[in-house]
Amino acid sequence: MHELSICNSMVRIVQSHAQGRTVRAVNVRIGAMRQIVPETLVYCWSLVTESSDLAGAELLVERVPAKIRCGVCGREQILDQPVLTCDGCPDGHLDLVEGDEFLITSLDLAEV
C-alpha cells in the first residue's frame, strides 16, 4: 500500500503551498497507467490528515484514461485495457499521450 506514503508526501506539499490557510479540498489527477488505486488514495488521505491541520480537507480525484498515439499511422486511441497496441497497425511504435499523470492540480482554500 504505497498510497499511504504518497499521501504523507502530499500532506507536506499541500501544507507548504497553503501557507497556514485552511484547505477545504485538494484536487489531483491520476492517470490510468499509474499504479495508484484512487479509492485507496482517498482512504489513506483521510487517515493521514485526520489529526493534522488538514483534517476535513477532501481529496478530489480526476481520473485520466490512458491514450496512445501510433508512431506509424498517427492514430490516437483511448485504452480500455492496459494493452499497448494500435488497432490500425499492431506492429507500430506507440507513445503514451495521456494516462501517466499524477499531480496535485489545485487547492480549494477557505477565504480569510
Image (spheres, helix red, strand yellow):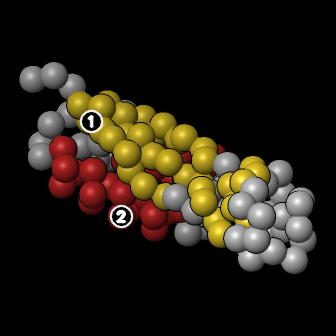
Looking at the picture, how far across and down is residue 42, in whole percent?
54, 45
Neighbor class of circle 1 (other Cα within 10 Å; few <14, some 14-19, many 20+) is many
Q: Is residue 111 above or below residue 99?
A: above
Farthest residue in the front direction? 73
- x, y percentage for residue 26? 37, 40
Inspect the image, locate mark 1, and give the three-letter code of the amino acid beneath it: Val
Classed neighbour count for the residue bearing mark 2: other residues with Cα under 10 Å, few (<14), some (14–19), many (≥20): few
Quarter of the image with the N terminus in it: bottom right
Q: Nearer the viewer, residue 31 or 88?
A: 88
Distance from disc 1 to disc 2, alpha carbons, whole Å, reads 16 Å
Label count reads 2
- 84 vs 102: above or below: below
Quarter of the image holding residue 2?
Answer: bottom right
Query: In the image, 98: left or right of 20?
Result: right
The x, y position of residue 101, in whole percent, is 52, 58
Q: Quadrant location of residue 97?
A: bottom right
Q: Position of residue 16 (x, y in %)?
A: 18, 55
Q: Can you identify the residue that label 1 sits on?
A: 23
Residue at 12%, 46% in the rendered image: 19
Q: Residue at x 53, y 41 (%)?
A: 61
> Does residue 82 lie above or below 18 as drawn?
below
- Front residue (pair 112, 72): 72
* Callout 1: SS: strand
Element type where label 2 sits in the image: helix
- Horizontal side, residue 86 vs residue 28: left or right: right
- State the residue at coordinates (75%, 50%): 78
Observer-nearest residue: 84 or 32? 84
Residue at horizontal 67 percent and vertical 49 percent from the top: 65
Label 2 amino acid?
Ser
> Which of pointers 1 and 2 lies earlier in the amino acid sequence?
2
Q: Residue furthest top?
A: 111
User: What residue does disc 2 label?
Assistant: 9
